[in-house]
């Protein structure tokens, strides 16, 4: 696999290169940025102002009562530079880690932020939901998202059993990833019906937990469902509307609809697929 470039890192939300691309309208373009003294001075001035505003937002975000209003404002503020900046500054105080140049889009919901790490140059798209459990009320779990990864709109990641997503991964729209889910059989009472409702008494439920792992360069297609124990190896592809609950090797081509099954291998020209 080609090595992804080392992303920028630092306390500020956005790097100098990111701002230069924005000002020069080269964001999303492979063209090199112009680093003339004038452009560099402009980026430095803007970063200085942004640092002061970011510090103020982060301070307000940890003050009780005020932080509720900050979350509501940040979550629903319209898309655009101000909205991305506001959401980034707020969530930088609430997450375990938030990398530089990462965009958190409008309507994103995050629960248990102290158990969630998001790398650099990621995009958490509109109305995605990340839920990792709240340690303060005894819940557990974690979600880890690597650099250069896109989480598609309206996707849901439940990290109670642990979810690890690699670098350069594409998770398309409306994907659901569950590392814990209710099951229809209770191992100690196999003849008794169990409830699928999470508000039923715990003794009437049975919840299966297992980590979910997605390797670097993988792609999870539209409306896929990944259940506890799902493992997608490096470079694997899961086609739309596929359900996965087991392990697939690197470069596997996993198809549906319904329960996933392997059909050959992803075959980039420079990569020899594993033997069948």
Image (tube, rainbow, N blue to C red):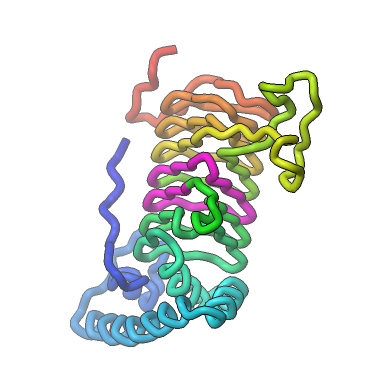
| Residue at 68% from the left image edge and 36% from the top image edge | 182
Extreme residue toward the left, this view: 37
Q: Quadrant of residue 53?
A: bottom left
Extreme residue toward the top, this view: 276
What stretch of residues is rendered in magenta? 142-167
Q: Is residue 265 above or below residue 208?
A: above
Left/right placement of residue 124 relative to residue 217 reads right
Q: Nearer the viewer, residue 275 or 72?
A: 72
| Residue at 70% from the left image edge and 26% from the top image edge | 186
Q: Position of residue 179 (x, y in %)?
A: 56, 38
| Residue at 43% from the left image edge and 28% from the top image edge | 251
Q: Is residue 117 above or below residue 161?
A: below
Q: Quadrant of residue 273?
A: top left
Quarter occupied by the C terminus? top left
| Number of disc labels | 0
Q: Is residue 4 above or below residue 80?
A: above
Q: Position of residue 25 (x, y in %)?
A: 41, 73
Left/right placement of residue 124 relative to residue 17 reads right
Q: Position of residue 148 (x, y in %)?
A: 39, 52
Q: Residue 234 in magenta?
A: no
Q: Position of residue 213 (x, y in %)?
A: 46, 36
| Residue at 74% from the left image edge and 28% from the top image edge | 184
Quarter occupied by the N terminus? top left
Q: Nearer the viewer, residue 144 or 62?
A: 62
Left/right placement of residue 209 relative to residue 10 reads right
Q: Nearer the viewer, residue 266 or 230?
A: 230
């Amino acid at each position: 696999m080609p090595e992804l470039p080392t992303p920028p890192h630092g306390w500020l939300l956005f790097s100098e290169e990111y701002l230069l691309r924005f000002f020069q309208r080269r964001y999303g373009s492979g063209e090199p940025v112009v680093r003339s003294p004038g452009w560099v001075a402009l980026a430095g001035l803007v970063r200085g102002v942004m640092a002061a505003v970011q510090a103020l937002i982060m301070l307000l975000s940890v003050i009780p009562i005020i932080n509720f209003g900050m979350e509501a404002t940040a979550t629903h503020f319209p898309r655009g530079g101000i909205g991305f900046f506001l959401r980034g500054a707020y969530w930088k105080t609430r997450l375990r880690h938030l990398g530089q140049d990462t965009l958190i889009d409008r309507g994103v919901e995050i629960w248990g932020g102290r158990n969630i790490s998001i790398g650099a140059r990621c995009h958490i798209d509109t109305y995605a939901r990340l839920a990792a459990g709240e340690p303060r009320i005894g819940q557990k779990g974690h979600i880890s998202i690597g650099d250069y990864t896109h989480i598609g709109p309206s996707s849901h990641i439940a990290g109670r059993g642990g979810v690890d997503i690699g670098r350069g991964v594409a998770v398309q729209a409306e994907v659901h990833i569950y590392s814990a889910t209710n099951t229809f059989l209770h191992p100690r009472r196999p003849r008794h019906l169990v409830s699928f409702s999470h508000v039923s008494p715990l003794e009437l439920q049975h919840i299966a937990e297992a980590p979910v792992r997605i390797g670097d360069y993988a792609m999870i297609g539209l409306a896929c469902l990944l259940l506890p124990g799902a493992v997608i190896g490096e470079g694997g592809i899961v086609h739309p509307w596929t359900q996965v609950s087991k392990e697939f090797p690197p470069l596997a081509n996993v198809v549906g609809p319904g329960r996933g099954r392997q059909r050959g291998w992803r075959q980039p020209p420079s990569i020899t697929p594993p033997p069948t």
